[in-house]
Amino acid sequence: MSYIEELGKKAKKASVEIASASTEQKNKALRFIADALRENKQKILDENKKDIENAKQNGISDVMTDRLMLNEKRIDSIADAVVALTSLADPVGEVISGHTHQNGMKIERVRVPLGVIGIIYESRPNVTVDAAALCIKAGNAVILRGGKEAINSNKCLVGIMREAIAKSGLSMDIVDVITDTSHETANEFMRCNKYVDVLIPRGSARLISACVQNATVPVIETGTGNCHIFIDETADIEKAIEITDNGKTQRPSVCNAVESLVVHKNIAEKILPLIKAKLDEHNVEIRGCERTLAILGKSDKVVPATEEDYYTEFLDYIISCKIVDSLDEAIEHISEHTTHHSECIVTESFSNAEKFLNSIDAAAVYVNASTRFTDGEVFGLGAEIGISTQKLHARGPMGLRELTTIKYLIRGNGQIR
Amino acid sequence: MSYIEELGKKAKKASVEIASASTEQKNKALRFIADALRENKQKILDENKKDIENAKQNGISDVMTDRLMLNEKRIDSIADAVVALTSLADPVGEVISGHTHQNGMKIERVRVPLGVIGIIYESRPNVTVDAAALCIKAGNAVILRGGKEAINSNKCLVGIMREAIAKSGLSMDIVDVITDTSHETANEFMRCNKYVDVLIPRGSARLISACVQNATVPVIETGTGNCHIFIDETADIEKAIEITDNGKTQRPSVCNAVESLVVHKNIAEKILPLIKAKLDEHNVEIRGCERTLAILGKSDKVVPATEEDYYTEFLDYIISCKIVDSLDEAIEHISEHTTHHSECIVTESFSNAEKFLNSIDAAAVYVNASTRFTDGEVFGLGAEIGISTQKLHARGPMGLRELTTIKYLIRGNGQIR
């Protein structure tokens, strides 16, 4: 039996146990995890320091190293997030619907855990705890596969969680980590259908694409957001400026930040200089079409856009800009370049708003509000494990409910067909 | 652009049109399809005859040839099923939930079509029409890839449907068929993520496994049913006999038929001879463990089971039988061999019933009722496109609702974060 099969088999066994654990048992495990994280801060920081030093030796960028880094405050906020989960409603056991068949059988549709969830992610060690805690609350076992640059931190965090879970009375195999970070092991993990029920990749577009290409375990794609704002000819100027600025500059590194501006030709001359003035406050680079450049003039902050730019999630102080002749052309442009995450129209026209809402194929479609609101808390789901940009199972922010499946229970007294 | 890409691109375009078609427009298309099938019976039968003759020349079995065969009555019943869909509620546009955020944004979760659905299936030409009609009613475009043995029938049926759809005023590209039935084309189809949103294989375990192994498009696994009945020591003898007989012999060729009997040792001596007597009426072969053979005696209808037999979906008048020492052993045995379709316990013990319901990981878990009830109509979903045996998106019978996804619509008045 291979390393992955062994991990999988243990996790599957533990998943049966936690599937029928009470909410109180699961909350107890979460509280024990939070306590243990706080008690073991120094140990965590020591291990994290090894990762940071390795990163520096390997010439990893400052931004990446910052993502890797833990400190006392960050550990506290990770522990706080774990405790916060204890106050969320437990989705497991919900009777979603039910009826009595004419032959007398009682048929119920109930919510049950998914089983074993695989999480594949990159450098942030906070994901290790966040993801594990969400899976536990929803009654699942979880196998974590983080990046090799965070391996010391991840091993330490998982060790602490496993001990805390065991102390709480549940099986420690509810959480485990893949310590062999080779590509071969990752590939075997992605094809371990016997033991892994679903794979949730969290990270770069490249990571997610690798999972989709290689996995036979069902994958939930998350997080790539090439989000657009379309400024319709009837847009309120102030709203358009504020929403564009907020979408682009409030936190450019996240998936619901805006990457592309699409502007109706009848409002472009008026609004583009105002938007540029606002974006200049954050030194945003505009990559525009020819008509954009004709209005704004070429400069070090206004450059021609390539076709590639319109497909790019910059995650930076850069925005592409395209002027269109009509709402239809805007919808067409967005439909071609969308990653199906969050798209917005700014308009005062009721008909244009409704047409945009109906025509755009994305997890979240906005009228006159910032795409930055695509978030589990805002959408009423509580904490989220990621934002699904695909259509099966879950779409948009994925909370505890999205970490469950359903099963039909049928109680009869001898019915046959 | 390859053949598959071209098909996909046309279907994607058509999917945008049908996504916003009214229920009445979709029902009209369905009625036109049903009418056209009845009007073109002779043409369909002529094309079907070619497939039947080819099948005979290629030495295909009588059972398989019967599956391929259409006649006037079968065409009528296919058309009736299409008309029946017009009376089902349209899932598209349902507002599943919604709330007003504290900042005033209205956030709604609404049901929308999946987009383009790919159906990969084997010989039955009725699937061509059934599947297409269900996809249309749920607002999707569909690309069909049937077996090469049914290619003449399928091309004819799809041609008739496309004309009928166009006559109804919608785009004929809502339905299309892959006429090149090579493996290369099938593989390209399974990896056409740009245009195909979901793949639903219908057919043998081999076909489904090929899709899971090769597809990058999300797959919904359907239909493999290695279903068990566990006869607990407290079982009512009459119920146990009736449920076993019904599960095995009422229609052995379907996925919710029973394939394996698991019997508590304390009731085995009493019940096994009675069950055998009942199954003898249908000449059922029992493949038993040593203890089964000790009770029933070895004969031409009672033979030793191999470990392989316990994993096998016979779809025939054959049943495996295993005697166990306890409910726990029964659960363990079933958990090892289940295909997660439908599993049943016959018991008069409340606690054992509840334990079985909670512990068995399957789409449908029964107490004292036949597994043959796992069906879209019985479960209150109306017509079904298949029975999902996996956990993501849909589990158990898949009706119109399971052919949709959701999207968040957010209406604001300038909110920013």
Image: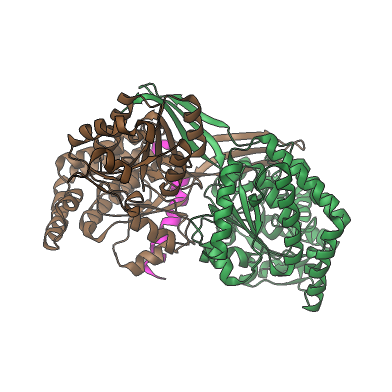
Chain colours: A green, B brown
Residue B261 x/y as whole percent: 33, 39
Q: Is residue A161 above or below residue B402?
A: below
Residue interval drawn in magenta:
B1-25
Residue B13 located within the stretch drawn in magenta: yes
Residue B139 seen by the camera: no
How far across and how far down the image is residue B109, in percent? 60, 39
Q: Residue at x 28, y 55 (%)?
A: B122
Left or right? Give the position of B63 relative to B362.
Answer: left
Instruction: Compare residues B129 and B218 and report the one nearer the observer.
Output: B218
Asked whether, in this view, residue A248 is left or right of residue B197, the answer is: right
Front position in the image: B235 or B295: B295
Along the viewing direction, whichever of A39 and A288 lies nearer the viewer: A39
What residue occupies the far front of the structure in this picture?
B294
Left-right relation of B168 to A112: left
**In this rendering, would A116 be left or right of B237?**
right
Tell me where residue A162 appears, x and y as whole percent.
Answer: 71, 52
The percent position of residue B240, horizontal first and vertical second, equals 33, 29
- Within the image, what quadrant is residue A199 found in? bottom right
The answer to if A239 sits in the magenta stretch is: no
Foreground residue among A117 and A276: A117
Q: Residue at x 67, y 67 (%)?
A: A291
Q: Is residue A272 visible?
A: yes
Q: Residue at x 79, y 74 (%)?
A: A54
Which image quadrant for residue A151?
bottom right
Q: What secondary structure do most residues of the magenta stretch adopt?
A: helix
Q: Quadrant of the C terminus of chain A?
A: top left
Number of numbered discs on residues: 0
